[in-house]
Image (spheres, grey):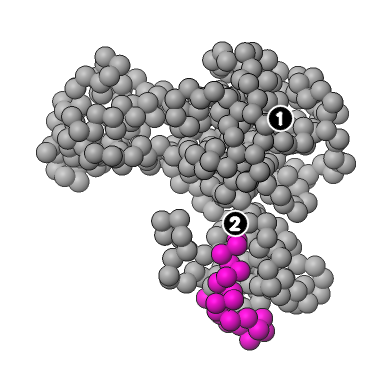
Amino acid sequence: MKRTVCLLAISTLLGACATPAPIAAAPATPAPILPPPEASSQPAVALPPPVVTPPAIGTLPPVPVPPHPPAANPRLLLGKLLPDYVKPRDGWRDDIANAFTALQLSANAENLCAVIAVIEQESTFQADPVVPGLPRIVWGKIGEKAGGYYIPLGLVKTALMKTSPDGRSYKARIDSLRTEGEMNELFEDMAAEAQNLNLPVGMKNPIRTGGPMQVSVEFAEAHVRAWPYPYARRGSVRNEVFSRRGGVYFGSAILLQYPVNYSQMLYRFADFNAGRYASRNAAFQQAVGKLSGSKLTPDGDLLRYQNGAPARAASSTQQALGKLRGKLQLSEADMLRDLKQEKSFGFADTPLYRKVMQLADSQQGGRAPREALPQIRLQSPKITRKLTTAWFAERVDWRYQQCLQRAR
């Protein structure tokens, strides 16, 4: 029983160590399947990037430039856009170029730089990013959980001396953890041995994000059901997320493979962190708050969700909209029908969205904002400072602007 409690504690903490990524519906039109490139099959060699200090938040205005046309030779352009420290250069170049071809994305400088900026921010071009102090984080969480059951940490470590499939004990593997990929493999082995370890049969791996762009495993699994994966899979979709080629492919999909009307790439970066259309929805929440006199946090989520479906309890946005029912001339059922489209491009064409924004324009005496950075505090054991979605988007945008300078 004690061993069961200890290992269940690990399952809880492993889920906490992962940073959530946006999850959204994938497109339904299939793309041509491409063979995996030989040049990108070698593992990445991580070299330390140069130390660069981004400017303070809000101090770097966006650089207005006309969109570049799609590159006739994306690989040639990528050779100029990738930071100098990237190794192996050909491998990263080919993985990005192949992802754009498979996903049918326009390979212009803006889109290529957007992917490069996210990779640089999330992993500094490490295929499986190193998490500093990961064993300490893991053992700390195990100790917290064990303490809740009045079990000494020493007893937990003794229980984890059992040999794992790779020949080492689970304790030794935790002590030597460096990356989320290693942590994922550890938990995959624990899940496979659940019955022998007195763990619940069918227990799922709680590691939710990984790879060089920190992509949601759930998004990747949904994407391959709607859009053919271009490579011969080496194991599960989960394993592909933790590879360089798979991480770049799925990261490019969630960042760029959906239509928006944003004025700046900055808002796609915010969506990458907070969820698709979160920036549009945050602006909608700001408009609703001003019109109704309600204090709303523009987090980009218009409904409450439970197990992936809208919850019965009304969200704060729904409650604020209730105050506007007379002005909007929409029933509660009509508003809920439209709000259920909040994760799609079509929400902007619903009667609810159009009427709210028309009222906001009238109140402001001009065009109200159609985009805003979501206000979300980032939570993870790996984060030791107060960071937000706005912080993430601004930092990625700074890297994006640097990449565009290389394009010129």
Q: Is residue 156 above or below residue 349?
A: above
Q: Quadrant of residue 136?
A: top left
| Percent position of residue 85, x then y | 66, 17
Q: Is residue 325 magenta?
A: yes
Q: Amino acid at mark 1?
A: Thr
Q: Quadrant of residue 347?
A: bottom right
Q: CA distance from mark 1 to mark 2?
A: 25 Å
Q: Is residue 286 above or below residue 266?
A: below
Task: Give the overall secondary structure of the magenta segment.
Answer: helix
- Dot 1 alpha-carbon crowd within 10 angstroms: few under 14, some 14 to 19, many 20 or more: some
- Residue hosting label 2: 343
- Residue hosting label 1: 101
- Residue at (80%, 67%) from the top-left corner? 367
Q: Secondary structure at mark 2?
A: loop
| Percent position of residue 54, x then y | 67, 35
- Residue at (77%, 32%) from the top-left corner? 107
Q: In the picture provided, is 274 more to the left or to the right than 365?
A: left
Q: Secondary structure at mark 1?
A: helix
- Residue at (51%, 70%) from the top-left corner? 316
Q: Amino acid at mark 2?
A: Lys
State the residue in front, 333 or 22: 333
Magenta stretch in the rendered image: 319-343
| Percent position of residue 236, x then y | 44, 29
N-terminal label among 1 and 2: 1
State the residue in front, 10 or 106: 106
Q: Is residue 157 magenta?
A: no
Q: Is residue 63 visible from the viewing direction of this image?
A: yes
Q: In the picture provided, is 99 more to the left or to the right than 64?
A: left
Q: Is residue 282 visible from the viewing direction of this image?
A: no
Of the 4 image quadrants, the one containing the C terminus is top right
Q: In the picture provided, is 7 more to the left or to the right than 207?
A: left
Of the 4 image quadrants, the one containing the N terminus is top left
